[in-house]
């Protein structure tokens, strides 16, 4: 499974106190999940040239786990996206901007005629 970068753990723990609304149930869930999502969000890796990449690696190796773009792409493709696909329940608000391009049953009907 996916393990978040432990470099973010101190910031996550520090923000749980002041940034989470602990007095109201709905607000508590909302703000806590925002902080949890920020903790689990993969680190953004900028595209760089090889020379810049070496410099950045040397600077950040002491601060964070050295994760390459290929490793991050692997995790996103094989861990994160399948988990979202399996567990995401879309609400009406989420479906507002979604347009259906193709329908598998409809495609079968079209190609049965050929």
Image (cartoon, helix red, strand yellow):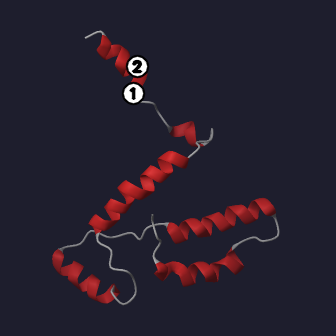
Q: Is residue 7 above or below residue 83?
A: below
Q: Is residue 71 above or below residue 104?
A: below
Q: Nearer the viewer, residue 11 or 47?
A: 11
Do residues under tags 2 and 1 come within 8 Å of each other at their CB atoms?
A: yes
Residue visible at 37% across and 80% down in the picture: 65
Element carrying mark 1: loop
**Residue 16 location, x and y as percent?**
67, 77
Residue visible at 64% across and 64% down in the picture: 33
Q: Is residue 65 above or below residue 77?
A: below
Of discs 2 and 1, which sits in the foreground? 2
Q: CA distance from mark 2 to mark 1?
A: 7 Å
Q: Is residue 98 left or right of residue 74?
A: right
Q: Quadrant of the C terminus?
A: top left
Q: Is residue 7 left or right of residue 47?
A: right
Name the residue beneath numbered marker 1.
Answer: 102
Residue visible at 39% across and 69% down in the picture: 44
Q: Residues within 10 Å of mark 2 (few under 14, many from 20)?
A: few
**Residue 38 location, x and y as percent?**
54, 69
Name the residue beneath numbered marker 2.
Answer: 106
Q: Residues within 10 Å of mark 1 (few under 14, many from 20)?
A: few
Residue with the most extreme right position? 23
């Amino acid at each position: 499974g996916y393990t978040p970068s432990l470099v973010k753990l101190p910031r996550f723990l520090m923000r749980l106190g002041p940034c989470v609304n602990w007095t109201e149930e709905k607000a508590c869930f909302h703000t806590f999940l925002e902080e949890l999502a920020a903790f689990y969000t993969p680190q953004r890796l900028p595209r760089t040239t090889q020379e810049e990449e070496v410099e950045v690696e040397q600077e950040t190796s002491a601060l964070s786990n050295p994760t390459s773009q290929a490793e991050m792409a692997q995790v996103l493709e094989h861990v994160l996206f399948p988990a979202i696909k399996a567990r995401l329940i879309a609400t009406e608000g989420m479906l507002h901007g979604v347009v259906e391009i193709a329908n598998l049953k409809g495609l079968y009907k079209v190609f049965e005629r050929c």
